[in-house]
């Protein structure tokens, strides 16, 4: 079995570019913020920062339409890098120059490979492999024969589909490189997006599939020993009412001693209800 933590480093520029393209369409919103008083009362909802699977009319923005083909090719490059990463982890040897792996070579090898990574990730990787296979001809045409794009009707994506594909690609990288506590939520987000593109990968709809939203919680306290039930209940209610998974970073402010404690979301979602701030160091928090 192998992991994907080092994979993101190989495609960090493409990942950042796609993240920027998504932000361009959705707008750079303030992260949703919920503030809790020492009594546990909540107030101050802000905007949501990540509407996964969204986009709507924003897709018609001239800037994205102009660069939609480039966005698609960037997505395909990430999927290609993923396929190659998996093949090498599975023991395949890259050809010795001047020979090289073609897309067709990698596609054929990937299809035949019995994947040895985590069983929870295999269905997602197989869908990624089908995107790789089914969109290869379209990618080659965009790169080598762009003038014929409108003359042929091969398997293709419109601007809305390309935007979803960009979101899917970024979310796929996130789930492969996520901290364990976040992985289930990210996995459901990837399934949600891949289901919207099922007519392209043709592997059927995945379950469970649920979008997610990122939030920021701030808790003002007046004691080292605190109860997080108000926060957990708040986001549980939001999840039930919206049908969306809730991710949140948590900052606890202890004003009387002028201290702040920060818990990133992969730690915040697994904190115990009863928390002693003197144990802060045990959570290996990295800002």
Image: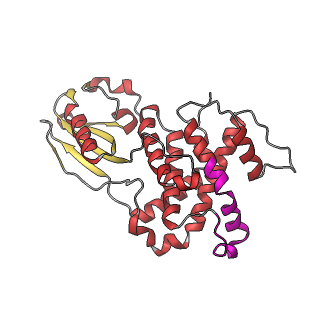
In this view, which residue lies farthest toward the left? 39
Report if residue 150 lies within the magenta region.
yes
Task: Locate residue 49: give its quadrant.
Answer: bottom left
Q: Where does residue 281 sit, x and y in percent of width and height?
A: 36, 26
Report if residue 171 lies within the magenta region.
no
- Above or below: residue 115 compared with residue 47: above
Q: Nearer the viewer, residue 190 or 196?
A: 196
Which residue: 51% across, 67% down?
A: 159
Looking at the image, residue 37 sits to the left or right of residue 57; the answer is left
Q: Where does residue 54 sit, x and y in percent of width and height?
A: 40, 58
Magenta range is 130-154
Q: Where does residue 16 sit, x and y in percent of width and height?
A: 53, 55
Which part of the image, by quadrant, shows the C terminus? top left
Which residue: 50% across, 41% down?
A: 175
In this view, which residue lies farthest toward the right? 98
Q: Looking at the magenta stretch, what is its main secondary structure?
A: helix
Which part of the image, by quadrant, shows the N terminus? top right
Which residue: 76% across, 36% down?
A: 92
Q: Which of 143 and 31 is in front in this view?
A: 143
Looking at the image, residue 116 sits to the left or right of residue 160; the answer is right
Task: Locate residue 89: give its quadrant.
Answer: top right
């Amino acid at each position: 079995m192998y992991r994907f933590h080092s994979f993101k480093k190989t495609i960090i520029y493409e990942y950042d570019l796609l993240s920027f393209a998504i932000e361009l369409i959705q707008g750079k919103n303030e992260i949703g913020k919920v503030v809790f008083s020492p009594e546990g009362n909540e107030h101050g909802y802000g905007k949501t920062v990540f509407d996964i699977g969204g986009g709507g009319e924003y897709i018609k923005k001239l800037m994205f339409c102009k660069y939609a083909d480039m966005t698609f090719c960037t997505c395909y490059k990430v999927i290609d890098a993923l396929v190659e990463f998996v093949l090498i982890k599975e023991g395949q040897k890259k050809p010795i120059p001047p020979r090289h792996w073609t897309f067709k070579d990698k596609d054929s090898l990937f299809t035949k490979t019995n994947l040895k990574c985590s069983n929870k990730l295999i269905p997602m990787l197989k869908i990624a492999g089908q995107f790789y296979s089914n969109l290869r001809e379209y990618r080659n045409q965009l790169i080598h024969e762009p003038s014929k794009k409108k003359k042929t009707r091969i398997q293709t994506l419109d601007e809305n589909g390309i935007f979803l594909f960009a979101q899917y690609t970024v979310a796929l990288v996130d789930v492969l490189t996520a901290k364990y506590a976040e992985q289930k939520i990210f996995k459901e987000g990837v399934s949600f997006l891949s289901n919207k593109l099922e007519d392209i990968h043709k592997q059927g709809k995945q379950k469970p599939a649920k979008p997610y939203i990122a939030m920021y919680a701030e808790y003002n306290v007046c004691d080292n020993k605190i109860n997080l039930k108000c926060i957990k209940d708040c986001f549980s209610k939001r999840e039930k009412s919206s049908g969306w998974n809730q991710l949140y970073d948590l900052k606890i402010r202890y004003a009387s001693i002028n201290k702040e404690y920060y818990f990133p979301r992969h730690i915040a979602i697994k904190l115990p209800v009863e928390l002693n701030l003197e144990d802060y160091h045990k959570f290996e928090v990295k800002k």
